[in-house]
Amino acid sequence: MNISEVDYTLILTANQSSAFKLLADSYPFQNNPNLLSVYDYKNEAVDVMAESCKKRRGRVMSAEFSWPNMRIHTSKLGRKIGKRKKIRKRPGLFVFPLQSRVTGVRYSYQWMSIAQENGWHVLLDACALGPKDMETLGLSLFKPDFLICSFFKVFGENPSGFGCLFVKKSSASVLKDSSVVSSIGIVSLVASSIPSQLVVEKSSDKEVSIKQKAHTLSEIEELERDSESDQSENWESYESGKSSGIECRGLDHADELGLVLISRRARYLINWLVNALMSLRHPHYSEYGHQLVKIYGPKIKFDRGPSLAFNVFDWKGEKIEPSIVQKLADRHNISLSYGILDHIWFSDKHQEEKETKSETCRSEVEGAHVSVVTAALGFLTNFEDIYRLWAFVSRFLDADFVEKERWRYMALNQRTVEV
């Protein structure tokens, strides 16, 4: 991560949501009453933070995103951050991801700088970055007060990862201990032969349950001091072969490939996929038929992220429910997800188009939310993977594809009854 131990304290958590909740329950929203986030999709971890803010009578705000390219509406976000000549107290917490995990939009580091200049505490969400991308974080220029990242699918086996919360030591004093925080698990990484810190409790029915220890933020530094004395001994055990240690096979493979190759390949693949999906059109009496796929966010672009939000439409222009597309993809061994685009801002042009659409097409946008199918490329994704995705989506050009799959599923799962 190229993060100095002098500047930051590292806290290991079970996942991204645990890290967000740990910070939210410890942040003094009662004194710094605003929460401002930059997410173009519904994020459960951010929703948890928003609920914690509201319970302490804080104000929850979000950036807005232009339809359909999902770019930040800069003037609106600038006004929400505000320009303060004299800072009497902190306005609150600014939560900023470097890129969208759903649409692939990438954002400028400058937003962090603007927020810091206006007195906000800044939380940088780096969970959308790949294993090698995190080495390139410009933390020497923009030092956020808090940073959250996740390491999943890096060990080669399940459970496949963990979350990280970095707390800037000069900002740690703002965090307060909370009775709620004690219910959140803070994990430790240990070699397999070293006994982990587990609490074993015997219940009345003589079964044995194992619970992970949880600690408040004030106990973390003490735990770190206690673990430092054992660290050298554990490392010697790891080096001497007495223990199997922790193997990060995914990270090792990423090191072999290198950042340049990983980034270049991801850019080629995602742009090919966008171009191929946009070329799919239903047969029509006119020269140009209805598009099969609509993509939300950037189209073909040099610096877009390796994730994609789209919807599939039938020959009449009606949206096929993303949940149906996801289930059919799963049946064909293709991993797609379901997401909801949020905080959408419509210009006068698009608002007029939305209001004049037919009833069936208007279901694409409900209020300021849009349900979408999402695809994410990893650093191990190859051309065969995205070609299989394109070939699967192209099957929706068959007007009866969904109905055929429904009958096929029923036929494969029917029961034989002997009379």
Image (cartoon, rainbow, N blue to C red):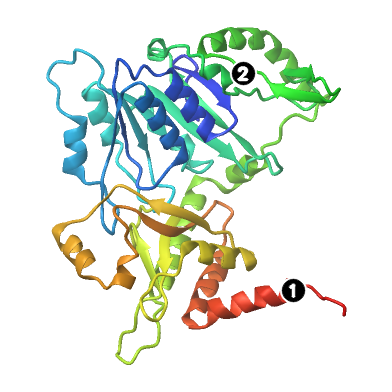
Pick the residue in front: 410 or 286.
410
Q: Position of residue 77 (x, y in %)?
A: 21, 38
Quarter of the figure with the C terminus: bottom right
Check disc 2 and give the amino acid type: Ala
The residue that mark 1 highlights is 414
Q: Residue at x 58, y 59 (%)?
A: 335
Residue assigned mark 2: 214
Q: Residue at x 38, y 72 (%)?
A: 278
Question: Given the current orientation, which residue lies at the most extreme bottom position?
Answer: 285
Horizontal side of residue 278 vs 18, given as left or right: left
**x and y percent of residue 84 in the render?**
14, 22
Percent position of residue 382, x then y: 57, 61
The Cα–Cα distance between marks 2 and 1, rounded to whole angstroms, is 48 Å
Q: Is residue 150 above or below residue 354?
A: above
The image shows residue 307, relative to residue 219, as above or below, that is below
Depicted 53 relative to depicted 230: above or below: below
Q: Disc 2 or disc 1, which is closer to the eye?
A: 1
**Disc 2 crowd, CA 10 A, few/some/many (<14, 14-19, 20+):** some
Tag 1's secondary structure?
A: loop
Image point 20% across, 43% down: which residue?
74
Is residue 252 visible to us here? yes
Q: Earlier in the sequence, mark 2 or mark 1?
A: 2
